[in-house]
Image (cartoon, grey):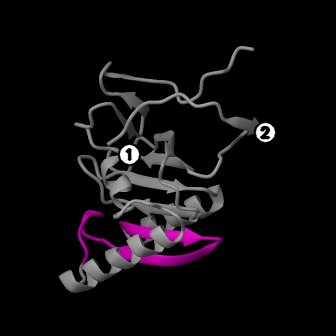
Amino acid sequence: VTRLVERNLSASSGRLELPRGYVKAAVVDRILGTCRVGLGVVEGFEADVGGVASTLNFNENNLVVLGRRGEDMAMAANRAAELRGGIVVVDHGRIVHELPMPLAGVMSLNSLEEVAGRLRDMNQYLREKGCMLRKPLNVLLFLTFVTLPEARLCPKGLVDVKKRRLTPLLVEAIA
């Protein structure tokens, strides 16, 4: 479940410096062709992994990307696009896991056993990298879900569900 919270985070040279426990998030429109990219920060994912990209998520099936390193996030997103959809995990410039889902970006051509095994392996890898969640990939599934009670991320940006409006990701601190 998502919540909107305010946190004091540091920035240097125009880049957000995220402490352990935080990952960057992006939702890229791949359905309407708008080229929009909504950005966010996720607290509690904990996995110290470069990038995870998935076209499998509730409602919109846009491309959701989480990660600690922008280059790895881009590599994961680009690989998911090359696969015509799926889930890709990249760490330190290397693809460590992938599950192609070429049917609308949400369905694999592999057997149920193969898909279940790959999902299990990906979740295990993310837990080994520090994520405390039982099924870390569920974060990518639910981050865009329209019926979340408080916050969701979409290609237009961060949505305050209760107020039914976009909310700014960053607010400048006043000393």
Residue farthest toward the top in the current orientation of the protein: 174
Magenta span = 85-108
Label drawn at residue 12: 2
Please give left or right for residue 83 compared with residue 71 in the image. left
The residues bearing labels 1 and 2 have C-alpha atoms spaced at a distance of: 33 Å
Q: Position of residue 90 (x, y in %)?
A: 55, 70
Does 119 appear above or below 158?
A: below
Q: In the rendered image, which residue does mark 1 sit on?
A: 33
Nearest the eye: 32 or 10 = 10
Does residue 157 sit above or below 162 in this rendering? below
Q: Is residue 155 visible?
A: yes
- The residue sitting at 35% across, 51% down in the picture is 62
Is residue 96 found inside the magenta-colored segment of the image? yes
Residue 112 x %, y %: 19, 81
Does the stretch in magenta take in 129? Answer: no
Q: Label 2: state its secondary structure.
A: strand
| Relative vertical location of residue 174 with respect to residue 77 in this rendering, above or below | above
Residue at (43%, 67%) from the top-left corner? 80
Near mark 1 (Cα within 10 A), the count class, few <14, some 14-19 or many ≥20, is: few
Farthest right residue in view: 13
The first of marks 1 and 2 along the sequence is 2
Disc 2 marks which amino acid?
A: Ser
| Quarter in which the N terminus is drawn | top left
Neighbor class of circle 2 (other Cα within 10 Å; few <14, some 14-19, many 20+) is few
Q: Secondary structure at mark 1?
A: loop
